[in-house]
Amino acid sequence: MLELDFYGTLVAASLVLLLGRGLVTRVNFLRLYNIPEPVAGGLVVALILLGLRSLDVQVQFDTSLQSPLMLAFFATIGLNADLASLKKGGRVVAIFLFAVTGLLVVQNAMGIGLAKALGLDPLMGLLSGSISLAGGHGTGAAWGATFSEKYGLASATELALAAATFGLVLGGLIGGPVARLLISRVKTPGLEQETPRLPKGFEQPNKERLITPFSMVESLALISVSLMGGSLLNSLLLGTAFELPTFVCVLFVGVVVRNGLAAFGLYQVFEREVSVLGNVSLSLFLAIALMSLKLWDLAALALPFFIILAVQTLVMALFAIFVTFRIMGSNYDAAVLAAGHCGFGLGATPTAIANMQAVTQRYGPSQIAFLVVPMVGAFFIDIINVIVIKLYLALPFFAAL
């Protein structure tokens, strides 16, 4: 067993990103289908580790940095959220939220239907639906424990985590190809187009930015305040009817800090700089998450459960193409939103952002997509997912369990 400490893991994550960039630059397939760099590098390392495991060589990473990086990313999303702009995008947010809710319903219906058809417990269908796919590892682990304790479903947590891992991988892989298919039908803005207001950072993270040491300290301070305030808010809400995931609380505090400072004329957030820090956090988070994947957990899945997840992936792609793209306007922004929907419909919001970055770096900016997806993916999807799951659990064949 080779155990990498904090510093070793950070070095490994940095090398994964460099590897991913090299692969996407040199491998035409990856570039053609807009595969995010952390996904490309992380999967290669995960496959290498899978091969080493067969030789009785195991590598253990220190993932203590993973959660702070994810929270820092959501803090930057909140700090870049201008409420005046959100009002302008209100209708688009509502329409996209409708599409997201529709997918949650479809995922659970598909999971339960396939589970019953394959002779599995319908609870396994729910675990392979919106609980683990749209919900991710955190939601999957929480509901898995509930299913084990309340309904007696064996290995529910392990199944949920394996399904969430499968979704994280496939969410990052199908977003680019889906976007490429849709973009072939629409007019793209082009990379040369300049948008009238900032931030551009999440759309075009490689664009040159002017940053000073003092301004960097200011931005880091704002992110730190958002992290501390979000953690405190989460602890206050813990166990109440208003309990929310920590990252949602962090994002909310970031929104309050940014707009509160602006409302009182105290400080204007340096959006470009905050987006740089957000992109660094996002890239390192994905690199650690993907290189730490235990692919043998997926290999250990029972074949019927694996079939359900494979069908769910196909359903996600078809839903993004025929529903999300169309109701969002069948234009370039809709194509970018469809790529993002693939990311958090199967995986997580950071995967959605990475998908959209891969698309916009090649075809041009989409401000509305980077406004809508973080808000829906962070604020709304977890709340709606809980409601949808509980409605399904109220169905007669679950109530009889």
Image (cartoon, grey):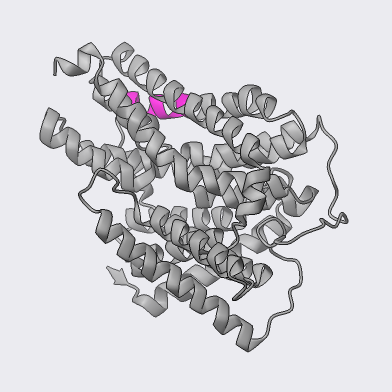
Q: Is residue 97 left or right of 144 when viewed as pictured?
A: right
At which x and y percent is residue 369? 66, 45
Q: Which residues are magenta?
A: 303-312
Q: Residue at x 32, y 48 (%)?
A: 138
Q: Is residue 55 left or right of 25 when viewed as pictured?
A: left
Q: Is any part of residue 17 visible from this angle?
A: no
Q: Is residue 168 magenta?
A: no
Outermost residue toward the bottom in this view: 213
Above or below, comparing residue 57 to residue 33 in the picture? below
Q: Is residue 150 left or right of 202 when viewed as pictured?
A: left
* Image quadrant where residue 331 sits: top right
Q: Quadrant of the N terminus?
A: bottom left
Q: Residue at x 14, y 14 (%)?
A: 400
Q: Is residue 304 magenta?
A: yes
At which x and y percent is residue 333? 73, 39
Q: Residue at x 56, y 62 (%)?
A: 259
Most common SS among magenta residues: helix
Q: Residue at x 40, y 34 (%)?
A: 384
Q: Is residue 74 left or right of 196 when viewed as pictured?
A: left
